[in-house]
Amino acid sequence: MSARRELPDSPYLTAIAGRKPSRVPVWFMRQAGRSLPEYRELRAHHKMLDACFDSELVCEITLQPVRRHRVDAAILFSDIVVPLRGAGVDLDIVPDVGPVIAEPVRTAADVAALRPLDPEQVTAVAEAVSLLVAALEDVPLIGFAGAPFTLASYLVEGGPSRTHARTKAMMLADPDSWHELMTRLTDLTIAFLTVQLDHGVDAIQLFDSWAGALCLADYRRFVAPHSARVFATLAHRQVPMTHFGVQTGELLGAMADVMRPAPATMVGVDWRTSLTDAAARVGAGIALQGNLDPAVLLAGWPVVERAARAVIDDGRCAVDAGAAGHVFNLGHGVLPQSDPEILTDLVSLVHSL
Ligand code: 1CP
């Protein structure tokens, strides 16, 4: 277990902690990946999951966008299904599709067969974190995991889904199996984040990307207690934590509530909700991350500049309305067809404002 770094000048960590950063911090979800020619070049020789289990490749791919764009945070190159693989689940990440599970989890017996994370299976991730905190000097490294609901969706559906219908059906028809599944996935998420924390990540982000598919009542009943256990269990590690999902406008208050015991917290907001509205929904004292529409990056620089200035202005209003701080990001991941030069220019613009 390595001692945590002190990065008192990091604008990213400062903003989450509710202090005034030297500039508006900016990083991008999916900043590593197919928008970068140097990533495509590396990936031409390695499959996605193989890359996630190769510490040198994880390190290099994580650093690529930091070198190129001068972002204020690095995010560990990995995937939310990596700990599932580390628990022995047979899965693959299929190009242009996403995670595909060989034997979907749909019955009480399937749930009972799920095993915990074997830390020996993710030593490459642990090694990569150690290498990265040594290489990154003054840039914080964000570790991450999928939240139990979003992991459950891949396991139950067997792959990506637009409606999450089978997942919701299991949740509503067989609540006992559902809560048992969520309990096991919560343990897995905590174990995977613990490995990353033990090796020195400076912050963590929990991706509940698809939680926005649920209504508030179902989120509170079937998901919130489990996500809350992730934050409550890790609160004593004293690292900043972010909670993110798309289409979560109606859930933002509940997503903030489940983080309450953690010391420095931030909620990620997609482009459908203004940061000022989000500040009112999450309540005072929580920082906000977001929320430029990723599609804006495809519309040419004048449009990007105007939209980015609007996000910065909205972030200022959110802070005036009680948000602890604002970290500039997209409302979801960088689209693969984005021009990397626009991303670099966007970082410079945000830093100049
Ligand atoms: O810079 C970074 O952010 C890279 C690290 C990263 C992260 C944080 C990757 C690499 N994946 C993730 C998390 C992840 N994976 C999430 C949560 C974030 C989000 O909402 O985007 C989710 C839902 C996944 C699942 C997944 N993995 C998908 C989505 C499928 C769907 O349901 O629509 C896909 C396409 C993948 C593969 C993947 N993961 C990461 C990359 C770069 C890729 C594409 C692989 C490639 O073709 O190069």
Image: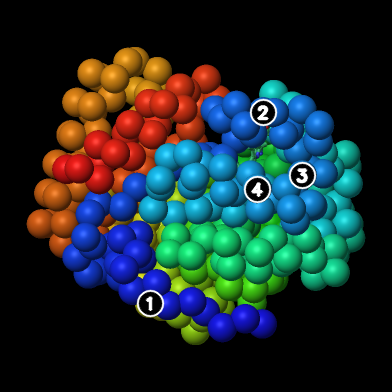
Q: CA distance from mark 4 to mark 2?
A: 13 Å
Q: Which mark is residue 60?
A: 4
Contact between labelled residues 1 and 3, with CB atoms less than 8 Å apart:
no
In the picture of the structure, the residue carrying the numbered disc 3 is 51
Quadrant containing the C terminus in the rendered view: top left
Instruction: Judge: label 2 CB < 8 Å from ligand 1.
Output: yes
Q: Residues within 10 Å of mark 1 (few under 14, many from 20)?
A: some
In the picture of the structure, the residue carrying the numbered disc 1 is 263
Residue at position x 38%, y 77% from top?
263
Q: Which of the 4 image quarters holds residue 167?
A: top right
Instruction: Judge: label 1 CB < 8 Å from ligand 1.
Output: no
**310 vs 62: above or below:** above
**126 vs 28: above or below:** below
Is 297 situated left or right of 348 in this image? right
Please state the total of marks drawn on the protein image.
Answer: 4
Q: CA distance from mark 3 to mark 4?
A: 10 Å
Contact between labelled residues 4 and 3, with CB atoms less than 8 Å apart:
no
In the picture of the structure, the residue carrying the numbered disc 2 is 40
Ligand 1's quadrant is top right
Q: Earlier in the sequence, mark 3 or mark 4?
A: 3
Query: Hey, what amino acid is under mark 4?
Result: Glu
Spot occupied by residue 292 in the image (x, y as percentages of width and height): 32, 34
Is 335 situated left or right of 328 in this image? right
- Tell me the element at label 2: helix
Q: Residues within 10 Å of mark 3 (few under 14, many from 20)?
A: many
Badge nearest the viewer, 2 or 1: 2
- Can residue 57 be seen from the camera position used here? yes
In the picture as drawn, the residue positioned furthest to the top comes out as: 299
Q: Nearer the viewer, residue 209 or 202?
A: 202
